[in-house]
Amino acid sequence: MATSGVDTMISARAVEMKAEGSSHDRRTKIKTRFKNGKKIRVIHKLDEEQVRWMMQQKANGQMGSAEIAESMGVSDRWVRKLWSRYRFTRPEDITWPPRMGRPVEGLTGRREHSAVLSCCNQGRRMAVRIETMVERSIGIHISHHVIHGILKDEELAENQPAKAKQQKWVRYERRYSNSLWHTDYKQLPDGKWFVSFQDDASRLVVGFGVFDEATTDHAIRVLEDAIKRYGKPAQILTDRGSQFYANEKENTKRGVATFETRLVELGIKHVLARVRHPQTNGKLERFHLEIERHL
């Protein structure tokens, strides 16, 4: 099998690392310590060639994490951590030490471009959803604005003039806690339903629950538990979902208006969000997005 210049250089560096000698020890600052009664070498700082060689051996399956760790004088845990970071990166593309600070936006190479299209081929066409999937799969953050640009270049997305217009936002926030609570349901990846109540002023999630179904009774149960812990809010903001609100076509069905009835009994004013305007409940929508990102 033919070897590239990079592989030859990395292999030569690896052989050099295994050699013994005082000049070599001074150059790489190798120290020895004992672990579980066994003497091992510890390299405090790995250089780029060493990291590339380690990932090359791991990718080819020629050496395991423990064997690589012993040969380089590092812990096997550190090898596994490097592998989780660079497993989708070609050895010649590895930069070490890694870039610190905020992620660089707008720099999308072939690997990032392929990852975006791969997520799109799985049925995901929303840039925000693809943003989360790419970060989970290759460990690199790409702005959803950049992703949308890639999709447009591939004719998989269209311009949205309405969203391109600059909007004037008015910050909506209550001054005191328990003035207003937000509530809504969110379906989790496993099919269960997550309901939560969030205080508008403090952003504190005063109550939550996970259930098999999104029902009015479950929402009321979580609400009553939250009131016992934090007191009663003056108002509660919900969307017009059937768990919280009975419209003219549904108000004759049994149990649909139970949530509204319970709020009247508790002396809480029911505030409804505007139709097709999720920004009204934006704080809770943002909280649900963070839950989705970390699941």
Image: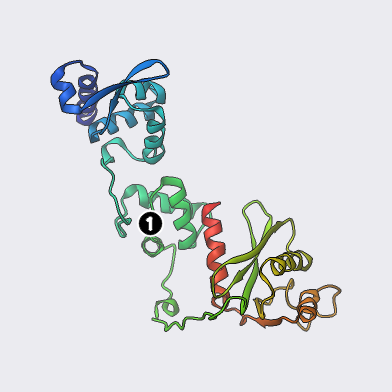
Mark 1 neighbour class, 10 Å CA radius: few under 14, some 14 to 19, many 20 or more? many
Residue 189 visible to an observer of this rendering: yes
Residue 64 visible to an observer of this rendering: no
Q: Residue furthest left?
A: 23
**In this orientation, which residue lies closer to the viewer: 191 or 23?**
23
Horizontal and vertical percent position of residue 38? 38, 15
Direction from residue 107 to residue 141 in the image, left or right: right
Horizontal and vertical percent position of residue 39? 34, 16
Q: Quadrant of residue 20?
A: top left
**In this orientation, which residue lies closer to the viewer: 243 or 237?**
237
Q: Residue at x 53, y 81 (%)?
A: 175
Horizontal and vertical percent position of residue 220? 76, 68
Q: Residue at x 30, y 60 (%)?
A: 106
Direction from residue 96 to residue 139 in the image, left or right: right
**In this orientation, which residue lies closer to the viewer: 173 or 259?**
173
Q: Which residue is mark 1?
A: 142
Q: Provide the secondary structure element on which disc 1 rests.
A: loop
**In this orientation, which residue lies closer to the viewer: 107 or 17?**
17
The three-letter amino acid code for the residue at tag 1 is Ile
- Is 126 above or below relative to 248? above
Q: Quadrant of the N terminus?
A: top left
- Is 82 above or below relative to 117? above
Direction from residue 74 to residue 118 in the image, left or right: right
Q: Quadrant of residue 161?
A: bottom left
